[in-house]
Image (cartoon, grey):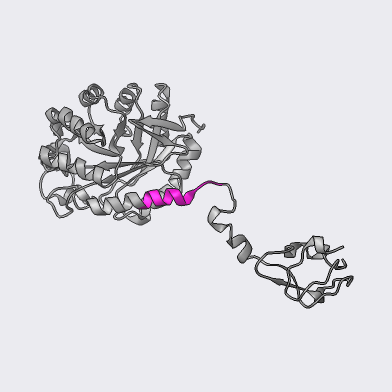
């Protein structure tokens, strides 16, 4: 598998993401608008207030994404089997109406929050283009639908591809599809597709694998509870973070329980920004706040006792003490055998100018 060359920094709306830039934080409201446009607006406002960069919806029509007959033939053990009603009905209730898209995008831009969608059919990709979407998020479930991946990538906008429930070979195939379109603006998100997913399944080191294998921007689409996985991914170089967002986890609906409420999301944002500050650079140097510590916590050579002018210094004349106001201990051998140019008082730091 040859390393692909993608952009190290890409523009999404007014923000740059990638090398040297802060992470883009996306809040996915999924089905949490509960069929209400006013609630969708409240969610967008809450994302902005919590410090998120982008509010994202999911754009699908139930008949174009699920087969009721197909799901009814399965004995579902996971999240889909816990809804208590046919999967097709749940998806139908979670549709974000196409007629709402423009006014939702307009509202988000009006309040100053980024906005985009995960499009799940060709028509809505075109709608996103009409609305001026600044990027496209491709959900993990479509990673093997190369036709729509190609269609999206050919729009020339940045592509954020989630990679849950997939093998590295499948990710590589999808990346090749994007690369062949000439679109070099890609971010790959490690993801575990379960709701919620287990922290022990997070497999954060896949982020390093993606960086090495594809040379693209990396991130994490996280379905675990809390922000441990998010912070770990930031430490490993993630530049895109996606989390589900709700106003109340106790509301009825498929996405609320595994989503973050505003206060929790805001704390995560703060901790991400704090982590980014803490990571700093790879250059090891004395921090400004350590300028005094360099002296007060380090040792230098001191006179153990009074030393008369002309006396030759031996080990018994010298002691290593804080603060470092004199010759450093590592230069002790360069001091031994020298003579004092003047009288040196006990517990006075030694300086080369006082020795001959």
Residue 304 in the image: state x and y as whole percent. 76, 76
Determine the residue positioned at 42% across, 22% down. 180
| Figure quadrant of the C terminus | bottom right
Main secondary structure type of the part rendered in magenta: helix
Indicate whether 351 appears above or below 82: below
Quadrant of the rendered structure where residue 57 is?
top left
Query: Nearest the camera: 210 or 239?
Result: 239
- Count the labels in the image: 0
Range shown magenta: 271-282
Query: Nearest the camera: 312 or 140?
Result: 312
Residue 152 in the image: state x and y as whole percent. 31, 25
Query: Nearest the camera: 138 or 302?
Result: 302
Residue 207 in the image: state x and y as whole percent. 44, 44
Indicate whether 341 appears above or below 100: below
Q: Is residue 170 visible?
A: no
Q: Is residue 152 visible?
A: yes
Residue 204 in the image: state x and y as whole percent. 42, 49
Determine the residue positioned at 20% across, 53% down. 257
Query: Nearest the camera: 312 or 168?
Result: 312
Answer left or right for 270 relative to 341: left
Indicate whether 19 appears above or below 147: below
Residue furthest to the front = 342
> Is 278 contained in the magenta span?
yes
Answer left or right for 293 relative to 171: right
> Is 190 contained in the magenta span?
no
């Amino acid at each position: 598998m040859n390393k692909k060359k993608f952009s190290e920094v890409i523009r999404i709306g007014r923000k740059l993401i990638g090398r040297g830039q802060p992470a883009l934080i996306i809040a996915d409201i999924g089905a949490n608008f509960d069929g209400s446009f006013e609630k969708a607006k409240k969610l967008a406002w809450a994302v902005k207030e919590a410090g998120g960069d982008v509010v994202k919806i999911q754009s699908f029509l139930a008949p174009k994404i699920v087969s009721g007959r197909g799901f009814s033939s399965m004995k579902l053990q996971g999240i889909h089997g816990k809804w208590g009603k046919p999967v097709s009905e749940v998806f139908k209730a979670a549709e974000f109406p196409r007629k709402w898209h423009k006014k939702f995008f307009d509202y988000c831009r009006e309040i100053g929050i980024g906005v985009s969608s995960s499009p799940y059919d060709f028509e809505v990709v075109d709608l996103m283009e009409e609305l001026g979407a600044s990027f496209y998020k491709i959900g993990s479930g479509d990673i093997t639908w190369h036709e729509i991946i190609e269609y999206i990538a050919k729009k020339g906008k940045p592509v954020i591809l989630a990679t849950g429930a997939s093998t590295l070979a499948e990710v590589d195939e999808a990346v090749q599809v994007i690369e062949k379109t000439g679109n070099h603006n890609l971010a790959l998100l490690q993801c575990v597709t379960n709701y919620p997913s287990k922290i022990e399944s997070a497999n954060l080191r896949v982020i390093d694998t993606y960086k090495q294998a594809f040379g693209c921007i990396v991130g994490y689409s996280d379905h675990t509870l809390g922000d441990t996985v998010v912070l770990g991914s930031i430490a490993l170089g993630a530049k895109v973070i996606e989390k589900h967002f709700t106003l109340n986890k106790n509301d009825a609906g498929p996405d609320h329980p595994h989503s973050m409420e505003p206060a929790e999301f805001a704390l995560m944002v703060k901790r991400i920004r704090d982590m980014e500050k803490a990571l700093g650079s790879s250059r090891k140097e004395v921090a400004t706040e350590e300028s005094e510590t360099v002296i007060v916590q380090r040792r230098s050579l001191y006179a153990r006792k009074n030393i008369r002018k002309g006396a030759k210094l031996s080990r018994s004349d010298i002691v290593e003490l804080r603060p470092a106001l004199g010759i450093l201990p590592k230069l002790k051998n360069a001091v031994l055998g020298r003579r004092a140019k003047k009288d040196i008082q006990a517990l006075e730091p030694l300086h080369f100018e006082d020795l001959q």
